[in-house]
Amino acid sequence: MARIVRCGLIQCKCVDISGKSIPSIKKAMLDKQMPLVEEAAKRGVRVLAFQELFTLPYFPAEQDVRWYVAVEPVPGGETTRLMQDVAKEKGMVLVVPVYEEEITGVFYNTAALIDSDGTFLGKYRKTHIPHCWPGFWEKFYFRPGNLGYPVFETAYGKVAAYICYDRHFPEGARILGLAGAEIVFNPSATVAGLSEYLWKLEQPAHAVANGYFIGVINRVGTEAPWNIGEFYGTSYFCDPRGQMLAEGSRDRDELVVADLDLDMIQEVRKTWQFYRDRRPDSYVEIAEDLP
């Protein structure tokens, strides 16, 4: 019997944040996206992923300590607890990106993985932290992840997260494949221009090179007061052959749904023997730092 898993991605424009407190912004963003969660449940989605920092604007567009109050523990924070309840009620695996506080003053860009019975399975912390171009000042807010590249055994398959800027680094994408990932989600916040042409190049390449499915999520619209560019949506699913299965619009809130046939992974890997033919003994240089 085929292992077909219906998966979903939620892309969303941020609410108007002018005059709002950070707690009220988080509540408004949750309220805005919950109807799409309901739609996902009605459409039979079994694994659902949200965009990077899904309850907040992309605040690394500025460097301001006021955003430090947006952090919460993972697990145990209000967002993780709420989404555990949602996962249990809807019978869905959830990939939940959160601004995490480990201890006072130590923060991470994190994705919580929650199983369909509401169990907190673990978390991935964004490993590669950008601090480049006007408006991407993430090292002011996030410490580099220190949990490696975990893959989580869920009710519907082996799921992993790899967050936004991580997608430019093939090393972690390979490690996820070696660890058994079947579906890798990349919650993102990326704007038109400099890296847009890479959006449909790098991640299908990861899917092909590593023989797994990828689901990538990008928010939509512009966010005042920073207006660093247009978040262009186009969230999509890609199969292990690099083929697009479903794609979202460029400019509206949307649930993107696709049926992923996980049996394709074995079929593709029988054809393309990239894991058999690897030569890790010859790759020593890429694991060494610059002199």
Image (cartoon, rainbow, N blue to C red):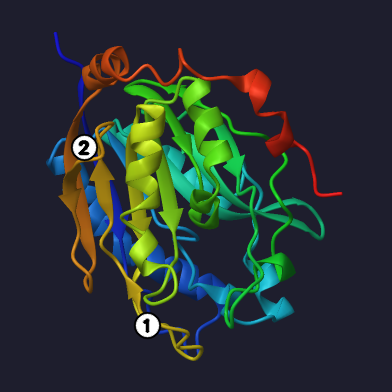
| 7 sits to left or right of 169 | left
* Residue type (three-letter) at the residue carrying disc 1: Thr
How much space separates mark 1 and mark 2, taking CA atoms? 28 Å
N-term-proximal mark, 1 vs 2: 2
**Mark toward the viewer: 1 or 2:** 1
Task: Tell me the SS state at disc 1.
Answer: loop
Label 1: how many Cα within 10 Å (few below 14, some 14–19, many 20+) = some
Q: Position of residue 83 (x, y in %)?
A: 43, 44
Q: Position of residue 88 (x, y in %)?
A: 36, 32
* Residue type (three-letter) at the residue carrying disc 2: Val
Res 276 → quadrant: top left
Say which mark, if any, is on residue 177.
Answer: none
Pick out the residue farthest to the top: 1
Res 190 → quadrant: bottom left
Q: Position of residue 218 (x, y in %)?
A: 36, 61
Q: Which residue is mark 1?
A: 222
Q: Which residue is mark 2?
A: 45
